[in-house]
Amino acid sequence: MSVSLAATVAELQRIGAPDEALGVLRLGRGIGPLRTAPMLIPTGRAWRLGVVLVDEHGGIYATGEVTRAIEPLIAVTNRSAEAERKRELRRMAARGPFAEGDTINVDFTPLSLDDPADPLSRDGDEVLVRLPSGSRVPLERYLADRVAIVAEGLL
């Protein structure tokens, strides 16, 4: 774990920042029509810090889709395919062993400095984060700013 990630984790723990669940899809099991329903299963917890998630071990991930562990209400007709997919994701989260209302990050991916598609890159010895605007800022400064926002209760 890098020094900046270790300091970030320590500060998040010190201030009691709320974390979120990490979950992965487990497809239904069984034979033929006798199958269990697909569900999200927990793989850990992490703090959401903008475009990245940081876990207690200093793992850093790209954010994916976010859902909540709530049983969706009765569907309204003529919903888009995207709305139905999100509704089914909430249902799968509710089937999993998450606390009701828990926020769950799905499709998160570990970040690597070697993958140009990731929001992290290296410029000499400095690790940079690519923001949605396209600008790049040093990871250490980005994490410090995000922790400050969390500490102020704005995130």
Image (spheres, rainbow, N blue to C red):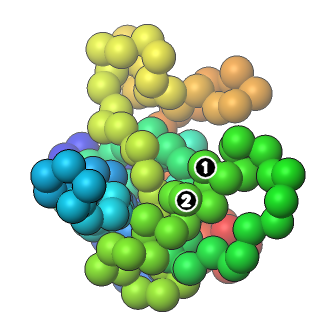
Residue at the outermost right position: 78
Residue 149 got which mark? Answer: none
CB-based contact (under 8 Å), mark 2 and mark 1: yes
Amino acid found under the numbered disc labelled 2: Glu
With 126 as the anchor, is 48 left or right in this view? right
What kind of element bears circle 2? helix
Position of 78 relative to 22 (above/below): above
In which image quadrant can residue 92 be found? bottom left
- The amino acid marked with disc number 1 is Arg
Picture residue at 67% right of the left edge, 68% below the top? 155
Residue 148 visible in the shown view: no
Q: Is residue 73 above or below residue 45?
A: below
Mark carried by residue 88? 2
Asked if residue 110 is positioned above or below residue 96 in the image, the reply reads above
Vertical arrangement, residue 122 with respect to residue 72, above or below: above
The residue where tag 1 is placed is 85
| x then y, percent, for residue 27 | 27, 51
Q: Residues within 10 Å of mark 1 (few under 14, many from 20)?
A: few
